[in-house]
Amino acid sequence: MSHPALSVVIPVYNESLNIQPLYERLSAVVRSLQLTHEFIFINDGSRDNTLELVRQLAAAHPEVKYIDLSRNFGHQIAVSAGIDAARGDAVVIIDADLQDPPELIGEMYAKMKEGYEVVYAKRRRRKGESFMKLLTARVFYRILAAITTISIPVDTGDFRIIDKKVVEALRQMPETNKFLRGQISWIGYRQTYIEYDRAERHAGKTGYTYRKMLRFALDGITAFSNFPIKVVTIVGFIVSFVAFLFACISLYIRYFTNLPVERGWTSIIIAILFLGGVQLVSIGILGEYISRINTDTKRRPLYFIRESNIGTK
């Protein structure tokens, strides 16, 4: 079976209101490009009728493929499942909420033809999002850029087109706590971007809660930076130095001056609470890294598939 020129990987979670308009816009784009293609929908444990709508599309259109995961594994794992199944010479990653315009794919594909292996979409403005979400996203991307050893583009999501060489490289990276935009940056090759204004969701509610965003941020930081561990080490040295300094001052006052040495409960309790807090935070940071090491050493599969039509058409 010949490979299509383009695979479009679309993770979906409770996106029943967006499936049809997304398909129509994607189809219009690939028709204008005159490319052989496949659309791969990955159902990540949706609780609405998303899967049924995708099945209906697949029955009517042979280019539509789908993977139904056995449960909700998370956005990054769902995208990874689609990348594993993609057969195209180039692969587009796009969410189903239509905040990222499918019409940009033509421009991204043209840019790739200039010799780039990765073309990602960089957001100029983001409509329909709260001030807090915009602020936390802005802070996160800039902190990540400052502390990582690789250049991870700021103000970008997973919306991008990647060459099959990058796809093969991603398939060789089996870590469980995925942070794909960081992995793609780490892989290297020639990368560039196209700027755009991100729209509001077409319909439905986002599945990205603040809790998931925090977990995603931790995955990004711990996967590509040892900076938090360095901070723990530096804080440990500072606290030890301060304690040693106070001890020296106390000894000096006791033996070389006539001043009394204060023995108040307040200062003792403050010191204990301060040192205890530093220790707990340090253990928590180290625990995050150890937890990820433990998860990866188990070598469990990233996901399980309940149902798929890939290989049947």
Image: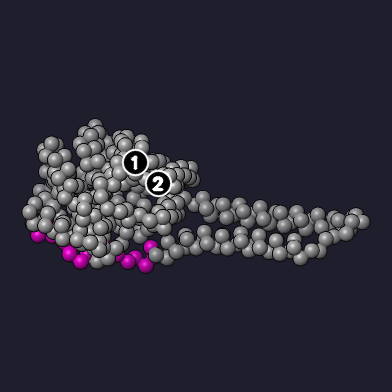
Q: Which quadrant is home to the C terminus?
A: bottom left
Q: Is residue 160 magenta?
A: no
| Residue 296 shows in this picture | yes
Determine the residue positioned at 71% across, 64% down: 269
Report which residue position mark 1 lands on: 127
The secondary element bearing badge 2 is classed as loop
Picture coordinates of residue 31, whole percent (x, y): 11, 39
Report which residue position mark 2 lands on: 130
Three-letter amino acid code of the residue under disc 1:
Lys
Determine the residue positioned at 23% across, 59% down: 43
Q: Which of the pair 148/268 is nearer the observer?
A: 268
Residue stretch in magenta: 296-313
- Above or below — where is 164 with respect to 174? above
Determine the residue positioned at 52% across, 62% down: 284
Furthest residue in direction right, as rendered = 258
Three-letter amino acid code of the residue under disc 2:
Ser
How many labels were placed on the picture? 2
Picture coordinates of residue 95, whole percent (x, y): 26, 49
Picture coordinates of residue 257, whole percent (x, y): 90, 54
| Residue 159 shows in this picture | no
Left/right placement of residue 290 relative to residue 128 reads right
Majority secondary structure in the magenta region: loop
Q: Which of the pair 280/237 is nearer the observer?
A: 280
Check whether the beta carbons of the residues at disc 2 and disc 1 lie within 8 A of each other: no
Determine the residue positioned at 31% across, 62% down: 73
Q: Is residue 304 magenta?
A: yes
Marking on residue 212: none
Left/right placement of residue 204 relative to residue 221 reads left
Q: Callout 2: few (<14), some (14-19), or many (20+) C-alpha neighbours within 10 Å? A: few
The secondary element bearing badge 1 is classed as loop
